[in-house]
Image (cartoon, rainbow, N blue to C red):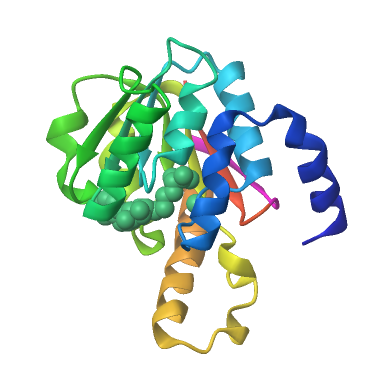
Amino acid sequence: MDLNQNYLTQLHQKLDTNIENLRPYAEDNQVPIVDKLTLDMIKQLIRMNHTKNILEIGTAIGYSSMQFSSVANDIHVTTIERNEDMIALARNYFHQYGYNEQIRLIEGNALETYQQVNDREYDMIFIDAAKAQSKKFFELYTPLLRKGGIVVTDNVLYHGFVSNIDIVRSRNVRQMVKKVQQYNQWLMEQSGYTTNFLNIDDGLAISIKGE
Ligand code: SAH
Ligand code: MG
């Protein structure tokens, strides 16, 4: 890890909540939960933009949805997950950490769950599921985002491969990385949105929906 990033991650440890206890489990089991500085940035966006309703694509074990909910009691997260093992773990953690009231878990493929989440307008959409499908998720769900709302896309630099695709040997990974490159380019060109990209952790895109 980059020295500056390492330093800031250490510095940030005093902000940790008990939810942070899930990180070692995630790391040991190859569950790709959001990195710490990225999380810190997103929590700050939540505070700055009066975010109350969040839609998350990709729950995994529920780490990020609990972290977002921990910012304030009146934040509500709707989160979508298709993997049954993850769903079971997430439900268990929501119960254990006391987030059942704030988090609604929708089970299924996020390309097919629009009807289950279109009962409200969202202030933020966090796209963090299958990386080759980010554009589809964006197109499907951003009609539910309020003006001035924010789309946050995680892993836009995917393992450093996005800026250096030549090092990727696997054909499948290459295909996926190409999709991420296309998505980033496409995102930049969306006239209804202003996007900036952050070179922290695995790369983060922040897109503000125009007024
Ligand atoms: N947001 C979580 C990490 C999510 S990891 C955190 O930071 O804590 C990505 C998750 O997206 C995986 O659990 C995977 O099963 C799920 N996923 C991938 N594609 C999906 C899809 N099309 N529909 C629903 N879930 C999906
Ligand atoms: Mg991620």
Q: Is residue 49 visible?
A: yes
Q: Which of 29 and 209 is in front in this view?
A: 29
Magenta span of residues: 192-200
Q: Which residue is drawn at 39% across and 81% down?
A: 172
Q: Find residue 106 and report its horizontal and vertical position in percent.
A: 21, 37
Q: Which residue is drawn at 57% across and 30% down?
A: 18
Q: Nearer the viewer, residue 127 or 196?
A: 127
Residue 50 appears left or right of 140: right
Q: Is residue 191 visible?
A: no
Q: Within the image, what quadrant is residue 146 found in?
A: top left
Q: Which of 171 and 28 is in front in this view?
A: 28
Q: How many marks?
A: 0
173 w.r.t. 33: above or below: below
Q: Find residue 85 and report its horizontal and vertical position in percent.
A: 26, 54
Q: Residue at x 22, y 53 (%)?
A: 84
183 w.r.t. 140: above or below: below
Residue 144 appears left or right of 207: left
126 w.r.t. 84: above or below: above
Magenta span: predominant SS is strand
Q: Find residue 2 and report its horizontal and vertical position in percent.
A: 81, 60
Q: Within the image, what quadrant is residue 48 found in?
A: top right
Residue 95 appears left or right of 173: left
Residue 148 appears left or right of 138: right
Is 9 one of the magenta-colored residues?
no
Q: Residue at x 50, y 50 (%)?
A: 33
Seen as rendered, the residue at the extreme front is 96
